[in-house]
Image: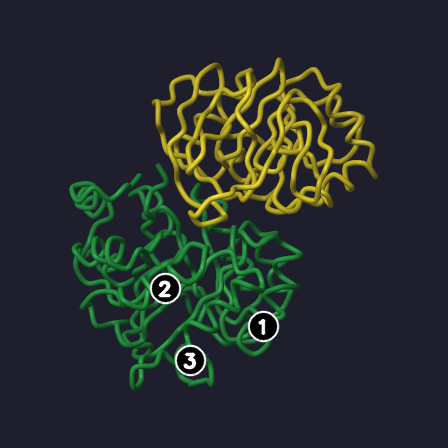
Amino acid sequence: MLTKRIIPCLDVKDGRTVKGVNFVSLRDAGDPVELAQRYAQEGADELVFLDISASEEKRKTLAKLVRDVAQAIDIPFTVGGGISSVADVGILLNNGADKVSINSAAVRRPKLIRELAQRFGTQSIVVAIDAKQLNNEWIVHLVGGEVPTERRLFEWAQEAVDNGAGELLFTSMNHDGTKQGFANNALKQLSELVSVPIIASGGAGEMTHFVDTFVEGNADAALAASVFHFKEIGIPELKTYLDQYQIPVR
Amino acid sequence: MNVVIIDYGAGNIQSIRFALARLGITATLSDDVAIIKNASHVIFPGVGEASSAMEKLRTTGLDKLLPTLTQPVLGICLGMQLMCNNTAEGKTKGLGIFDTDVVRFETKLNVPHMGWNTVSGKGILFQNIDQNSHFYLVHSFYAVPNENMVGACTYDVSFAAALAEDNFFGTQFHPEKSGAVGASLLQNFLAL
């Protein structure tokens, strides 16, 4: 049986892991390769690296990080953060990344998704969507959640999938950093709308939140950062917990 | 041991290379007929689209070479699919090593089938691997079960997660990305 995936997310800046709360105030949480290895050994199903550095050296640093991670771990991983061209993606995949996650660049130019899907296959293209609920509408935001757009979550999700997104990574900015649970209503609506896997992100605080997002939100995977980085939830105990609730896990 | 990974422009060859390196093996990447013929073990990877991958094999003559190899050959993901008769992806004629066809998932479930699923395997490739171990898969097309099937997986329909015919093996899943069980399977292949 296909299992639900648990995905630790490593926000990296200039080669180090950091984690923002509500996308601001960063806190160092260690060396990415070491963390990646620890998570792989503990039974993480996949990893996501989001590069939030803006330096000119970014491309080189990120390619090296991808290579170091790919050499160290034997589970799939996705890399995102400021990716905006076919050339960027080629470098990351050739260095050993399994998937790339694109966000702002895809909103600015949706055709990029199609170009990437045609070149690398839909299975390696994750479209990440950060959205905030305002007056009952989910508004897509860019640049790490700073800039609101004209886009609505559901229409954008549909368009991204139509263009060739192989997977969606949906972060609710209302939930991110709150540790009060995932945006399960929106997730459920998304899962009914599109036929690609959906990764729930933003709001994990307790093990029961993972059960809720798989059952109520119908998410295929759940992503979290600080609860894992600061050892508030251990992946082995989380897997045991999910198993008790009849959620298929590895 | 002289392991050669066939380099025909398919994506993510590094992952296989790194997985072999973790097992202490330095593999050679090559599209050269003589080098591939001389290998002790051949790995035929594949991520991408079937018809363009087949086209690349034709331009290098590897489509003729592959079915004639006598050493152990392991096709992974699209590599395995191209070793079948026909694949529905781009209506592509395959290498015909495994006597089955590759078709698209017709299901209400998500496509691609992506993530960790249980595989019930048998034979030399799955030695010392627990039944129903989890392997990592990502694919939209699958090989229809036939007498070559040595690993079965279910995603709405039952499909061939692993195939074997004489010295030829194929896995739909990615052993290089399947943690410790994947490493065991690669070791089983390298021990042949």
For image coordinates 35% across by 22% down, the residue present is B131
Render colour scheme: by chain
Report the disc number at residue A141: 3
Of labels 2 and 1, earlier in sequence is 2
Q: Are marks 2 and 1 in contact (CB under 8 Å)?
A: no
Q: Distance between the residues labelled 3 and 2?
A: 23 Å
Dot 3, how many residues are within 10 Å of its Cα: few (below 14), some (14-19), or many (20+)?
Answer: many
Q: How far apart are marks 3 and 1 (CA)?
A: 15 Å
Front of the two marks 3 and 2: 3
Q: What element carries label 2?
A: strand
For image coordinates 65% across by 26% down, the residue present is B42
Dot 2, how many residues are within 10 Å of its Cα: few (below 14), some (14-19), or many (20+)?
Answer: many
Q: What element carries label 1?
A: loop
Query: Which three-letter amino acid code belongs to the residue tagged 3?
Result: His
Q: Is mark 3 on a helix, strand or loop?
A: strand
Query: Which three-letter amino acid code belongs to the residue tagged 2?
Result: Thr
Report the disc number at residue A110: 1
Task: Place residue A219 in its image quadrant.
Answer: bottom left
Residue B103: percent from the left, percent from the top? Answer: 59, 37
Quarter containing the C terminus of chain A: top left
Dot 1, how many residues are within 10 Å of its Cα: few (below 14), some (14-19), or many (20+)?
Answer: some
Residue A76: percent from the left, percent from the top? Answer: 45, 47
Report the disc number at residue A17: 2
Of labels 3 and 2, earlier in sequence is 2
Quarter containing the N terminus of chain A: top left
Residue A36: percent from the left, percent from the top? Answer: 37, 51
Residue A40: percent from the left, percent from the top? Answer: 35, 45
Chain bearing mark 3 = A
Q: Is residue A88 left or right of residue B24?
A: right
For image coordinates 30% across by 60% down, the residue present is A224
Query: Which three-letter amino acid code belongs to the residue tagged 1?
Result: Pro
- The yellow-tinted chain is B
